[in-house]
Image (tube, rainbow, N blue to C red):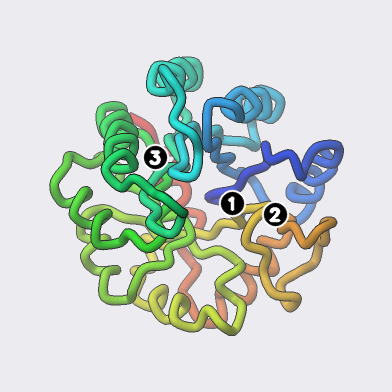
Amino acid sequence: MYDSHNHLQDNRFDGIRDKVIEEMRASGIIKCVINGTCPDDWKKVAALAHQYPDFIIPSFGLHPWKEITDNWEQKIIHWLNLFPNACIGECGIDRRIKKYDIELQKQVFLAQLRLATERNLPLSIHCINGWGCLVELMESNPLPARGFLLHAYGGSKELVPQFTKLGAYFSFAGYFLHEKKHKVREAFEAVPPDRLLLETDAPEMPPPSKAITHKLANEASHPANLPAVHHQVSEFLDTKKLSENFHTFFLQRD
């Protein structure tokens, strides 16, 4: 089993991170992708990838919620050069945040899309209230040959075929098992089985109680809950190709 997107570098794991990783492995999780969100946490992501090279795949990205600092692009290239098998992300488009500058978001996202395309690296995309903008960007720019990941996909069912044609993978987060997320679950019913992945987004997006086997303080999401999420998801989605999809998207390299 594989966690396609989490944030184990998050401060909420400080002091318990090694124990959490031990519990992830004991639960049956083989590998996970840790997504950096800004230059301040990329070093932490790198350190974890060095500490757990057989378990952690590092990903370096500038999230639309984060401050755009000087030379951020040079810094991300530095980390990608140190980790040739890394991923890019979390990055993307977000119209929900206050005082968003969509043109600046597009500029930063396109810079990361170009890097992923040039190096054919896995790209993890965040999108909230910006699906039309994202479709336009993906249709009008070169894309990685391996495709791209729509992390915790929250778009419409109608957009799934369009994104699939562009090369998208779609990751289901345990949070979508909450009753109020029935429209998201309906959208995932349109996802082809060979484009489906699972993620925790831990410590964010905790699943409902029926899919919680491991608890953390302050209602943070424990990534070792992934097998319980998988069990619930397999009741309404075809999950037979999850491992194959992870290998194809994240592990097969030129």
**Residue 213 placement, left or right of 151:** right
- Residue 122 shows which numbered tag? 3
Q: Which residue is at 56% across, 42% downward?
A: 33
Which amino acid does the dot numbered 1 rest on? Asp
- Which residue, given by chain and number where applicable, does mark 1 sit on? 3
In the rendered image, the quadrant that contains the N terminus is bottom right
- Which residue, given by chain and number where applicable, does mark 2 sit on? 223
Q: Which residue is at 60% across, 68% downward?
A: 175
Q: Who comes first in sequence, dot 2 or dot 1? A: 1
Q: Residues within 10 Å of mark 2 (few under 14, many from 20)?
A: many
Measured in 3D between alpha carbons, the distance from the residue under mark 2 to the one under mark 3, in whole angstroms, is 21 Å
Residue 192 image position (x, y, % from top left): 34, 69
Q: Secondary structure at mark 3?
A: loop
User: Where is 226 relative to 208, above or below?
Assistant: above
**Residue 200 placement, left or right of 24:** left
**Residue 20 placement, left or right of 9:** right
Measured in 3D between alpha carbons, the distance from the residue under mark 2 to the one under mark 1, in whole angstroms, is 8 Å
Q: Is there CB contact under 8 Å for labels 2 and 1? A: yes
User: Where is 227 relative to 150, above or below?
Assistant: below
Q: Who comes first in sequence, dot 1 or dot 3? A: 1
Q: Residues within 10 Å of mark 3 (few under 14, many from 20)?
A: many
Q: Residues within 10 Å of mark 1 (few under 14, many from 20)?
A: many
Residue 65 image position (x, y, % from top left): 49, 44
